[in-house]
Every structure is written in C-alpha cells, then in structure tokens.
Amino acid sequence: MDFSSFLTSLGTSFVVFLILMFLFAWLSRRPGNHVIYYPNRILRGLDAYEGIRLTRNPFTWIKEAVSSTEADVIRDSGVDAAVYFVFLSTALAILVLSGVILLPVLLPVAYTAENKIDANETTSKGAFNELDKLSMAHIAEKSHRLWAFLAATYWVSFVTYYLLWRAYRHVSNVRAEALMSPEVKNEQFAVLVRDIPAVNEGQTINEQVDSYFKAIYPDTYYKSMVITDNKVANKIYKELEGYRKKLARAEAVYAQSKGTANPEGMRPTAKTGFMGLMGKKVDAIEYYGEKIRELVPKLEAEQKIALKDKQQPAAVIFFNNRVTAAAAAQCLHDTMVDKWTVMDAPEARQLLWTNLAKNFYARLIRQYLVYFIVFLTIFFYMIPIGLISALTTLDNLKKLLPFLKPLLDQSTIRTVLGAYLPQIALLVFLALLPSFLLFLSKAEGIPSLSHAERAASGKYFYFSVLNVFIGVTVGHTLFDSLKTIEKDPNTVFDVLAASLPGSATFFLTFVALKFFVGYGLELSRLVPLIIFHLKKKYLCKTEDEVREAWAPGDLKYGTRFPNDMLILTIVLCYSVIAPIILLFGVLYFGLGWLLLRNQVLKVYVPSYESYGRMWPHMYNRIMAALILYQATMLGYFGVKQFVYTVFLAPLLILSLLFVYICTMKYYRFFESTALDVSCRELKETPNMEGVLRSYIARSLSAEKAADDAHFVEDLAHVSRPGSAV
Amino acid sequence: MDFSSFLTSLGTSFVVFLILMFLFAWLSRRPGNHVIYYPNRILRGLDAYEGIRLTRNPFTWIKEAVSSTEADVIRDSGVDAAVYFVFLSTALAILVLSGVILLPVLLPVAYTAENKIDANETTSKGAFNELDKLSMAHIAEKSHRLWAFLAATYWVSFVTYYLLWRAYRHVSNVRAEALMSPEVKNEQFAVLVRDIPAVNEGQTINEQVDSYFKAIYPDTYYKSMVITDNKVANKIYKELEGYRKKLARAEAVYAQSKGTANPEGMRPTAKTGFMGLMGKKVDAIEYYGEKIRELVPKLEAEQKIALKDKQQPAAVIFFNNRVTAAAAAQCLHDTMVDKWTVMDAPEARQLLWTNLAKNFYARLIRQYLVYFIVFLTIFFYMIPIGLISALTTLDNLKKLLPFLKPLLDQSTIRTVLGAYLPQIALLVFLALLPSFLLFLSKAEGIPSLSHAERAASGKYFYFSVLNVFIGVTVGHTLFDSLKTIEKDPNTVFDVLAASLPGSATFFLTFVALKFFVGYGLELSRLVPLIIFHLKKKYLCKTEDEVREAWAPGDLKYGTRFPNDMLILTIVLCYSVIAPIILLFGVLYFGLGWLLLRNQVLKVYVPSYESYGRMWPHMYNRIMAALILYQATMLGYFGVKQFVYTVFLAPLLILSLLFVYICTMKYYRFFESTALDVSCRELKETPNMEGVLRSYIARSLSAEKAADDAHFVEDLAHVSRPGSAV
C-alpha cells in the first residue's frame, strides 16, 4: 500500500463518518424515530427530550455526553456501563499520556536518523517512505538513538501501571457504593445453592434444604426455592404466549378492517397445519381463543407437576438480611467442596436456569472440554485467516483471479480495494464467532448470563489477539519472507520480530476503518432504524409488536469489549515502534467514549447488572496486552542489536509483580461482597415474599394472581417463616 | 562397601536395638522412672499403670500399642497425633502393598536375567554382587524383562493414589468429628483480626473494633481483646517468676538444712551481682522476698500502661456462637484485602504474640525474604554435604588423614567405620538445621506455633530431599565419575540416572541405622532418663524443679515428619530399582508406628492442637515424593534404552491430575471450618468471660484474682455484653 492509498482510505472513512453524523443529527429529531434514538429514556418513562434543552445545533448531543456524570450513567444504564466507561477513559488516558511524551520526542528522533533503512525491512518496499521515516524501523542498528525508544517503553508501562491502579481503586469504590445502596435489591438477600446431595428416604429436596440451612442460620434463614425442571412448562408457556400474540394480532387486523367502507369488517382466517401455511382454514380469533383455553389448564397442571416431582438438586435460598446472604456465599458449608456449593445469587433475570442443576464434576469436565474446543477453534481459524490475509493483496488477486485484472487495473478501484479489501475480509470473518463463543461459555455450566458473557468475551479476546494481531503479522511475514526462512530456518525469530513494523500500515488502516465507519454506524443506528421502519410498515399490527421492533438491546459487552481490546493491544504494541498510531488510538477511544456515552444515556438498556464484575477481566486483558507489548519490544530491540536490550527485562518482572499485587489487593471484593459493605442500613424492611416471588420462573408463575399466597406456599413446601427455633 | 560390611552394619544395628528394647522393658518398671516413661498419663492425673494389666512380660507395651484405637490416641494426644498415625499407616500400607507384588515378581525376574551387568554400573564395583543381582541394574538394556519393572512402577503409583485418597477422606472425617465435638473449645468462639486501619481521632483501637464488628454482627458479637505490646510486661513478669523460683529454692534448701543435727538450719545466701556469681553476699530468702515485693507493683503499673497505651492494630474478637466465628473467619470484611484481615483464631497457648500485629505487606515481604534465605540455605549446604559424603569414604580418609591409617587397617574397625561413618556425618550435619528453619518460619509473621512448625517442616523436607537424597546421589556420582563427565559433558544426564542404583547400598544402611538405633533411643528414652536423674540428684530442690526436669515435650512434628518423608522418598525412588529396600521401608514404618503409638499414649504431651491441619502438607509431600519417583523412573528407563519408556509419561500427568482433584475436593475444609460442622449443638452454654480470659497473655493477667471482673472490663474497654442493638 502506498501513501496515497493510505490517505484515500483515511479520507473516505472520514467522509463516511461525517455523513453518518449529519444523518444522525437530522434523523434523531424526527419524532417518528424517537423510539430508535431515545429508547432508554422512553422505557424509563421519560419524554425523549425531557430535561434536555432543545436547540437547532446538531452537536448538542456532544455537549450532553461530555457534561454527563458517572452518576448519570449508573442511574440510566447501571454500574456495568459505568465500569465500561472507566475502561474507555483509562485506555484513552494511557494513550494520551503516552502520546504527549512519545510523539514530540520519538518522531523527531526517528525522522532525523541517518537513513540506513533496508528496503526489505518495510512492507511497502520503499513506497511508503513518508510514514516509515517516522517509525523505529528508520533507526539504524545499534544506534544510541534507541535509548530514547527504550525510555519510551518504560514511560508507556509506568503510565499504564499508574492509571490502572487508580482505575481499579475507583471501580472498587463504585462497586462498593452500589452494593451498599439502601434500596432493597432482591439478589442481595439470596444465595444460590448447588450440588445438593441425594435426599434421605421420605424427604423432598425442599425439606432437606430447609432443615440443613435452618440449623446453620436459625435466625436469618427465610425460605428456599428449589430449582425445577421447567422444560415442559416452558414449552407450554411459550406456545400459550405465541397464541396470545396471534390472537391480539388477529383482533387488531379485524379492528382495522372495520373501516367506513366495510362496517362489519373481515374476520381474519388462519390455517391449522404446519407453521400456519397449510391445513384447514378457520376463523383466526375463534381458533386462537380455543387454543388458549385449552393450554391454560394444561400449563397449570404442568406447573403442579414441576413443583412436586421435578425438583432438581439446586436451590435459591433467601435470608432476611443482606449480611448473612453475603457471608453465606463466601463460606464452606459442607466439609467437601463438591456438596452444598453456595454462591452469590445472580439476578433472577439473568439466571441460566438449565445450568443451575448441573453438578460439580459435570461443570468441571464441561469447563475443560470447552477450553479444549476453544483452543481448537483458535488454532483452526488460524489457517483460513492466514490464507485470507495472504490472498487478499491485489497482486495475489490478480494472479489467482485473472478475469478481474481489467477491473483491478483501474487506478481508483485499485486504490479503494487495496485499502479495504483485506480489512473487510477480516471483519466479516470475525462477525461469525461471538455467538458461537457465547454458546460454548453457556455450555460450561455457568449460572448467570453476565458471567457467561464475561467468559465469552475472554475467549474472544484471546481469539482476536492470537488470530488477528499475531496471525496477521506472522501471516504477512511468512508469505513475504518465505524464501528467507527457507534458506536458513534459524532466522524465523528474527523475521518475526522484524515483521512488526511491516504490518504497521495494515493496522493503521484497520483502526481507522473501525472507528470512522464502525462508530458512524453505531451513532446513526442506520440498520436498526431501517429494520424498525420496515417492520412497522409491513409486519407489526399491535402495540406490543411495535415495541418489540424497536427494543434497543444492551451494549453487548461480549463483543464490544474484545474489539476495543484488540485495538488497544495493537496500539500499545506499535506505540513505540510507530508512535503515529497513538493518534489513531486516541481518536478511537475518544470518539468511542463520546458516542457510547450518548448511546448509554439514551439508547441501550442493560439486560443485567453485575456490579462491575467485568472489571477484573478488563484489567487482566489490559495487563496481558501490556506484557505482550513489553515482550514484543524486548524482541524488537534484540533485532535492532541494541546492547542494552537487557534493561527491558525488569519491566516484564515489574508487570507480573504489578498484576500479582493488584489482584491480591483488589480482586477478592469482585468475587464476593465485603461484609462491611453489605451491613449498611436499608431504606425499608424488605418484603421477603416479594423477593422470593421475583425468582420464580415466568412459566411457573404465569396464570397466578399476584397475591396468590397459596402458590408461594406450594413453592416452598416447608414454609414457617424463619424465626428462632 | 562389600556385602559382609553391609551385614555387619545391619547386625550391629539390630543388636543395639535389642539391647535398648530390653533396657526399656527393665527401666520402665522402676517406679522412680515412671515420670520418664509415663508422663502423659501422669499429667492427665492417671496412675502410670491405671487401666493396664501389669504382667512380667517385657513386651506388654507392644500388645497395648497394637490394641489401642484411634479414639485412644485422640483422647491422649489430640487429633494431630492421630493424623500423624494416619500418615505412618498410609506410608506403611503403600510399602506393604507394593512389596507384596514387587518382591515376589521383580526379584526373580532380576536374579534370573543373564548377567550382562557392567562393573561400572554398580557402586560396589562387583564386590556387592549378591544385592546387585536382585536389582534392576542386573537387567540388560532393551530387555523385555523391563516390562515387569514398568508395570511395577504403575502398581506402586496406583497403590499410592488409592491409599492417599482413602486417607484424605479419613482425616477429613476425623477433623470434622473433632470440630463438631459438643465440648466448648475456646478457640472456636474467637477469630483473629489483623491489619486494623488507623483509628479516628479520639477513638481507641478497642472502640473502633467494637463498633466495626457490632455493625456487622449485631446479635452474635461478644467482645474484643486488642493485642498489646507486652515486651516490658513480659520482661518484668519473667524476672518476677525467676525470683519466685529462687525464693522457693532457697526456702527448700533452708528447710532441708534444718535436720536433726542443726534444728536452726542454715539460712542460704545469695550474691546480688552478675548472674548471682559476684557482688555482696546477702540472706537469700530475705533478698528474693524483697525483690518480689518490689516487682509486683511495677508489673501492675506496666499492665495498666500496656492495656491503655500499647494497643496494637490486631485483636482477638469473640462471638457467642461457633457458626458466626467460623463464618467470620472465611469472609471478606473490608473491600480491600489488606485491611481488617480476619482468620480463625489459633489456640491461646500457641499464639505467637509478637507476630500478630505485623501488617499485611510486612508479612508478605517477610515471607518472600524468608523463601529467598531458605533457597540460599538449601543451595549453600549442598557444597559442604557434597564434600562430606565424598570425603568420608575410608579410602579418602586414609589419603587425607594418613595418621589414621594403622587404625583404619584393622578389619573390625574398618568394617564398622566403613558402614557408619558417612551416615553419622550426615546425621550430625542435619541436626543443626531444624531450629534455624523454625526461627525463619516464625520470622515470616505466621500467627500460630502449629502453622510455623508446618512451614518449618516443609522447608526441612525440601532441604532433605534436595540435599540428602539428590545431593548424596549426585555427589557420589560426581566424585566417582568425574573423569567420565570431564571427557564428554553431554553424558551428565546419563550418569545421573545411572548413578541411582549406585547409591542404593548407601541408602539401605542409612535407613537401617535410622530405624534400629533411632527408634531404639526413642523407645528407651535413655538420654532424657539420664538427664532427669542427674538433674534430680544435683540440681532440683523443689517439687516444681523436678517436674520441669521430666517434662516430656511433644512429638516435634517439625523434624520428625520430614525425616520420615526422607525415608519414604528414598524407599519409593528405589522401590522398583532395588525392590529389596521395600523390606527396610516396611520395617521403618512398622516399627515407627508401634513405638510411637507407645510414646503417644504414655510419653509425649501435645503442645498445641491444630485439628489435623498438618495433613494437606503431608499429602503434598507424599505426592511430591511419588512424582520425583516417577520422573526418576522415566529417566532410568531411558538409561536402559527401553523403547516403551514413553508409557511412563501418562503416569506423571495422572499424578498431577490426582493432586489437583484431591486438593480441590478436600483442601478447603483444612483451611477453614465448614459451617455444617460448627453448627452442631454444644453440651453447655459457653462461659464467654472464661473464653475471653483464656486469651489474655500471662504477663497481663498475672497478679489478678481469677474473679476480678474489673480487670476484664479494663481489657475490653467497651463492654456491654453483645446483645441486640
């Protein structure tokens, strides 16, 4: 890629971004689009503009985003979103503080070096001189100028340590603050018990759980809710809900057809066969009504059966104060770890029901099996990605697909394709993965959605770093320097380290594409907007259907965070080799912070709250990136034959020490709730029955009146309130 | 060493053992010696023979030892002793079960092999053929007979897995049983709090602790006892106790002197100067009385000062039930791990007071510093031991100390010295170490004696295995084969693996010496007996002094267990190479079990109770020995150029897996008390004031009446009994 195609790529990206931003300013003002641009506010019962001064200025949203506080974010989108912003601002601060020193120092040092550069040492083979002169590749071997780069490596590391230390403490405080809130939060009164041993003769699991915990917590134990196998009930419930929706839809269609022309209206019909496409034609309203009347008693019968005969060896148990629940989740209850395992209860809305009853060893085996599959996935994807990044250079395309030659020879097409093709191939490739990884993480037997997303995000991070970053770098090198290696296999390591600056331009355009086009789409929400309008026009008949069509979803940390981390890893690794990348990194995280602040305050709605448990994972990944960066630099200084390269080794030890100390000091509070935090006073005495009821699966509590006390009795067979024995 | 000197060594050892056993049978019957042979029984208020049928048979003790149950051991010497017996019997069972298969199978296989043995491959250079023929060294390279040895390696490993799994479960049950005992045990109601943060203005540490824990445990918190700096008080108290003893002694001397000849008696005198050896001569009784009268008010004043002004940032806090104490010890209290660290309180008698107030980071740094010093110790001792084991062969002695030549040329002396000299040198050498390691372990900042002894025992184990076992093996080899290695440095590894059978005879005699002479001395208690009688005759004047002279002490796990482990490691490592060593191993652990059973029931008195916390350490060491054995075998089969050596690799993975699973399943209960265990009912309501009082340092509670309620108030400044707020 030459310099002009690099600039073209930057330019087009920027133009696309500008267009999308103006589109956003224009579209978001039309009231019909408010449900797309302000769903978070609307769902919280606010007006789209409530509390916001409406001006003609299309950049008001920027002012709002900048002036919003962390407390606003927590109020509107929860602690997890606030923690995500701590991550964004920490990454931004690392890059800004690094850049403030590195750019004014390293660029002149590199540019004024005597140009002894070897043409083989750059990807562009001399055609991309303008940027190459600004990079470490331009420094001669053994030059004393390398001291400046060595010092820069230290500076970046110390900036990272300092900011991460502060961020960890800050997140810890945010989490503590949220956990000591005087509001009653149901999950703080509950713990999840798994691996309940086989019951004695003539005892239900429920009775066993009650007698076990009442002996240990005579004064604070409230009741238990044994997990049941709801597969059948869920199926019936789903069917029932489906018919209800269809009935509402049919009624809406009928009401609409009663126009002035046809006051009687036309009763809609339905087919009874496969997927409503075949079979006998019947009156839809009557047919669905009939079906619903059939299913309700069936569901009720199944609910009774599930509660009585389908108890599983897991339960959620409730305490009438927060301290006991927090303490219970941290304590060993049975002498064996594989029985009566107790842990903090996740929120009811994020429970992965089918995982709760999986036993200790099943979980263990599944975990290692999943790790193995992920390992295979990472290493088998390596091959296709390597092939793609090797094939999708223009010269290779021409060779492989000669019929494209006339097209590729046109200079504009050539420039644009040359700039984007490899990157687009990569992005499409990556889009396939996240749901597979989430599926795998759920299969591990993890009990909560937030935990599963964290696990998936970790896997995705390793995938990205190994395959995109290292894979692309090595792929380029292997392809470019295959002959060199063929002649002398011992040079593999040298070629590897030397290839880093070679891939710099690839990653510069990768980052630019990511933030200009990616963030442009994010802000303008073009795709959801179009889908919503199409659905509304052609599909939705009832109010509920419209609501479903604009439901905003959450931030999707599972993919968003690993993508950010990939960028951060790339930028860190190149920060000293090609400091110019810091500018792009700053733009990425700065724009990201700004845009997502808007999205978090107005668009996305969190689907769970884990009180910042994501943070230690973020911290670990940033440190992993930093250590990769330090190791890379160690290798690269070696390639430059710098005698004092050894001075970089303490940095690696320092990083490991820093991880050890941070994790030791801060991590445990993210694993479990500190008692000092949970002993704060509550605004009101919790309504324990309400707490318990909130944990009942929808399919079991459906068709019950809200005040059906008998039902709760049913659920918790032994049901004297927890008082002194 | 030739075969006859080996037999002589065995023979003399056995004769010494027999003599000592008969001495024991004879001496232990004389009532004057009962305090040496039955102190445990006497201290528990029993008669020496109570419950034992006295016969003339000198082997009655064997019958008693064999018929005693685990419950007897727990009653007489606590859970730790019982766990030590689980270790002994597990080791014994491993060796017996291994021997039952290995001896009848491997010995014939080895003996009937065609003797292609290379003279260089044995230490004895052909002179020790009789034993060499029974070892794996006798098998030719690549022989198919090696399959039998490979299978034997598997058999020993599986026997170990099976028995360790059972033992871990058994010890876990014993621990649970002891912890759920209905007796009130003070330490079960207490937890130790360290790293108390700096107090607010105008608050004492005591008030701060009380308000902090009352907020978290409003109903179950009783009181706290803040740790004070007792250095001065301890010094005064020690001085006071010294004068009391001297006074009692002077009075006893005076009373004795009032014989019929001199009804007035002679008042003893004392000198007031340095150590009572110089200075003015005064009347002893008056002088000591005066001193005591001076010191008592001084101590009382210091006690007040200590309680008020010398509070340290650590405390023992008390709960009025066991469950809360057990739960509190497992929970995170502050959001930071380095503040308000809570752990199970050790028994009062084993608290290491000066360590309690050390802060989190001081402990951490001290720990790593100690590890580093231990590392140095292990590797610097390597040199002297290597030298000693190389020098103390007879030929070398003759060369180095030629004046000994005439003596060494006498055949009897030559045989005995040749058999024992290197071993004695080694044993003496090892005697210097344990107290140094215990000192180091205490310097880590560990809060309890039992934990410090565990830590010291671990260090001693690594020392023994690295220096005695590996050091001696390599030392011999290096000395013997220095020339071979000089010629071709690549053979180092081959020489190392091949040298194992070479050191077999050394270790055979080492084990024999250990058990015959060591256990003979242990049973007969000759040394303590002689010291006691000397002291009683020439030094002791008062009843208390006599009692001190026969105080039996405890089992000294800190050195006893690592010594046993060294034997077990040696026997395991040679079990397949020279299966005959299994006989010696069985004798060692069999005799050990028998003799120590006697000692534990009648002699030793435990100085602490840790409820079997020693076990996981024992388990880990046994597994470390097994893994060393497996790795050694892998190397040795390699030396034998056996093509199927690779079949041993899964064994190593299996061992690591076994350690992982066992530790995961069982270990946590040894770290902390399971709540299910601590919620069992008590025989009586605990007297909380008594519990608290038991934790007061002697130097602070001395000179206080037992019912001085005001004193406890002083101690726990805030002292409303813990009831609902």
Image (spheres, coloured by chain):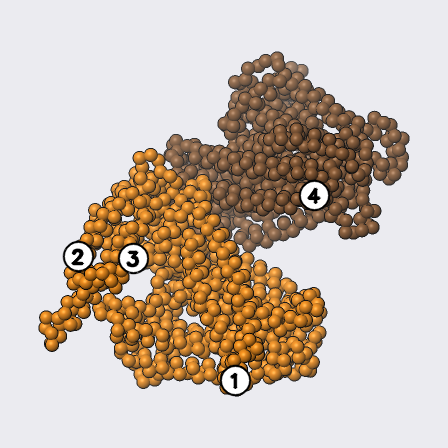
Chain colours: A orange, B brown
In the picture provided, is A662 more to the left or to the right than A292? right
Q: Is residue B484 visible?
A: yes
| Secondary structure found at label 3 | loop
Q: In what element is the residue under mark 2?
A: helix
Q: Are marks 3 and 1 in contact (CB under 8 Å)?
A: no
Per the image, label 4 sits on a secondary structure element best described as loop
Secondary structure type for disc 1: helix
Indicate which disc, 1 or 2, sits on the residue closer to the N terminus.
Answer: 2
Q: From this viewpoint, is residue B537 visible?
A: no
The span from disc 3 to disc 1 (Cα, nearest Å) is: 75 Å
Query: Which amino acid type is marked by label 3?
Result: Lys
For marks 4 and 3, give the CA distance.
75 Å
Comparing B659 with A4, the one in front is A4
Q: For the point 66% across and 28% down, which residue is it?
A: B104
Q: Position of residue A2 (x, y in %)?
A: 57, 83
For the N terminus of chain A, the image quarter is: bottom right
Q: Inspect the image, locate mark 4, and give the three-letter code of the amino acid beneath it.
A: Phe
Instruction: Tally the marks.
Output: 4
Q: Dot 3 corresponds to which residue?
A: A683
Same chain, labels 2 and 4: no
The spot of residue B52 in percent (x, y) is 54, 17
Provide the residue designation for mark 2: A290
Name the amino acid type tagged 1. Answer: Pro
